[in-house]
Amino acid sequence: MGRLFCSWGYSLRHFLSLITICVGSAALACPNGSETLVSCSMDGGKKQLQTCIAGDQVLYRFGATDRSPDLDLIRPVTEVDFYPWPAASHTIWEEMKFENGGFSYLVSYAQERDPRTPEISGQVVVQKAEETLATLTCDPGSLRSAGYPLPIFDAKVAAGQQFNRATYSWE
């Protein structure tokens, strides 16, 4: 059985549907009432990544397929770093970063703008103090995304944050 860590953030009442996470839900799927941001299988289907959003709460879930997740994080949208595509390349990409106990989990997806190459790729980079500990790549063809732009941008704006394109940061 996998390890299970829960971090509830500040606003549990907004994400009550996630209670099943901490009672050992084996399925890695977004809870009812939430929307998938980026999800995929990894390591030939042995691992699963799921990121979801519901209102002002964001979920990061990772672990072995068909088992309780190894890691569940629930964060207010204002505490999730989000880097939107700067519209300066042929590849559309976005990144989200979740922090937990000195570790960061950078989830990204990318897709070429050329319609002849519709494949979407994704990965998670695990870091501690700027040192990369692991880079996990989504299995080809397994990535599901809310699409560009990810709804986390609008959720951050609704929570009172503004994106400064000059500094490429949220204020």
Image (cartoon, rainbow, N blue to C red):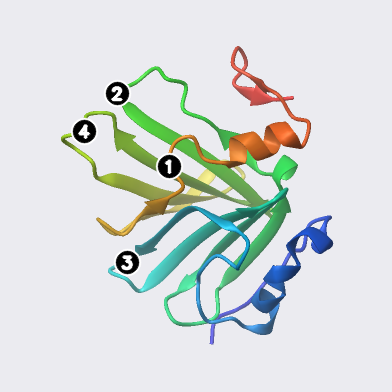
Mark toward the viewer: 2 or 4: 4
- In the rendered image, the residue lying farthest to the bottom is 1
106, 60: nearer the viewer: 60
Q: Residue at x 76, y 68 (%)?
A: 16
Reading the chain from its start, which is encountered first: label 1 or label 4? Answer: 4
Reading the chain from its start, which is encountered first: label 2 or label 1? Answer: 2
Q: Gap between marks 2 and 4, in whole Å?
A: 11 Å
Mark toward the viewer: 3 or 4: 4
For the question of whether residue 101 can be seen, the reply is no
Reading the chain from its start, which is encountered first: label 3 or label 4? Answer: 3
Mark toward the viewer: 2 or 1: 1
**x, y (%) of residue 1?**
53, 87
Question: Considering only vertical position in the picture, is 93 above or below 88?
Answer: below
Mark 3: which amino acid?
Asp
Reading the chain from its start, which is encountered first: label 3 or label 1? Answer: 3
Mark toward the viewer: 3 or 1: 1
64, 159: nearer the viewer: 159
**x, y (%) of residue 71?**
59, 68
**Residue at numbered disc 3:** 43
Q: Is residue 28 left or right of residue 135?
A: right
Task: For label 1, count other residues whose C-alpha is less than 10 Å away and answer few (under 14), some (14-19) or many (20+).
Answer: some
Reading the chain from its start, which is encountered first: label 2 or label 4? Answer: 2
Q: Gap between marks 2 and 1, in whole Å?
A: 16 Å
**Residue at numbered disc 2:** 90
- In the rendered image, the residue lying farthest to the front is 33
Mark 4: which amino acid?
Pro
Mark 1: which amino acid?
Gly
Q: Are marks 2 and 3 in contact (CB under 8 Å)?
A: no
Reading the chain from its start, which is encountered first: label 2 or label 3? Answer: 3
**Residue at numbered disc 4:** 115
**Residue at numbered disc 1:** 147
**x, y (%) of residue 58?**
65, 53
